Amino acid sequence: GGGDAAGSETAAGGDTVTVGFSQLGAESGWRTANTESVKSSLTAANGFDLKFVDAQQKQENQIKALRDFVAQDVDVIAFSPVIETGWDEVLQEIKDSGIPVVLVDRTVDTSVEDPYATWIGADFEQEGKTAGEWVAKNAPDAKVFELQGTLGSGAQVDREKGFDGVVGKQVVGKASGNFTRAEGKTAVEAALQTYPETNLIFTHNDDMGLGAVEAIEAAGKVPGKDVKIVSVDGVRDGLQALVDGKFNYVVECNPVFGDQLATLVADVAAGEDVPTETIVQDASFDQTTTQADVDARKY
Ligand code: GYE
């Protein structure tokens, strides 16, 4: 353990790198695509022995998985933290074990010094800012309800900061839908009662936006017209909603970075220098998106 990468030989002749990966859950299309990408890159053929554990959006499950990885003396621990805080104790334990950490996707807020070797993920604050700039330009008088992701998660905190920094004064109400379609629907059902003036929803991911579509239609309104929807992620269902005129704008968050992660994990295991952070590149989509774009989408 501790990054010495001692293990069996791979087909390619190198040492197998044992990596414990704690995924936070399977709450969204983004997460499913991310998990598939990670699993298809950290393969035995590529020199990895991947121990993958899904925490079902529960921090205590993640902490347990991380402790198990320490007990198993894996070569590298990778994890995507469900929320930012509450990791001090377990991160210190991992640090004391000497096993290097690769932080994936979401961020941590910890008092532990140098808690990880490297982080790979998207610029969530920029995503929120890009969404806010679309609203400022295309719907400057809109009354906005903000459908937040899991409260306290890096993706929620930073998307909100970026968006509110541009059009915060247009936000009439906020509630969390925990990044799932079902909870997004429930939150918007309530919001349409509490904030009937709402005519634009900024949702922190596509799945909650698709739940919002159901709630808006059930209330007898037209999504994309009576209530515009601005979203983040760009999964196929989200882009389909753009083509169907139900979403108005989608800021991409790219989940397909398994190959980049594999390279980082191998380099960290080999004790090589790695960049402190790798920012995954994002695009954005409006209603000029075509059915062909949707059909070509891989996730
Ligand atoms: O946007 C959302 C998922 O952390 C970037 O988590 C990720 C977010 C993503 O549930 O769909």
Image (tube, helix red, strand yellow):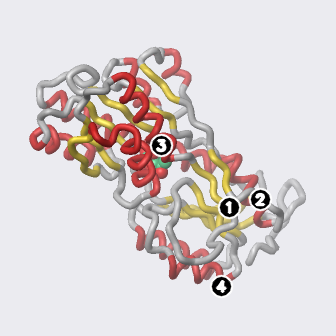
Can residue 31 be seen here? The reply is no
In contact (CB < 8 Å): disc 1 and disc 2: yes
Q: Is mark 3 within 8 Å of ligand 1?
A: yes
In the rendered structure, which amino acid carries the disc numbered 4? Answer: Asp
Marked residue nearer the N-terminal end (1 or 2): 1
Please name the amino acid that badge 1 sits on.
Answer: Thr
CA gap, disc 3 to disc 1? 22 Å
Q: Are marks 4 and 1 in contact (CB under 8 Å)?
A: no
Task: Report how far apart the C-alphas of labels 3 and 4 lie in the structure.
Answer: 33 Å
Residue 274 vs 77, above or below: the answer is above
- Crowding at mark 4 (Cα within 10 Å: few <14, some 14-19, many 20+): few
What residue sits right under mark 1 in the picture? 118
The residue carrying mark 4 is 96
Residue depth check, mark 3 versus mark 2: number of the one nearer the observer? 2
> Quick one: SS at disc 3?
helix
Determine the residue positioned at 83% across, 63% down. 272
| Mark toward the start of the polypeptide (2 vs 4) | 4
Query: Can you identify the residue that label 3 sits on?
Result: 30
Res. 171 in view: yes
Q: CA distance from mark 3 to mark 2?
A: 26 Å
Q: Earlier in the sequence, mark 3 or mark 1?
A: 3
The picture places residue 210, in percent across and down from the top left corner, at: 31, 34
Q: Which mark is residue 238?
A: none
Find residue 277 and report its image quarter: bottom right
Give the residue at mark 2: 274
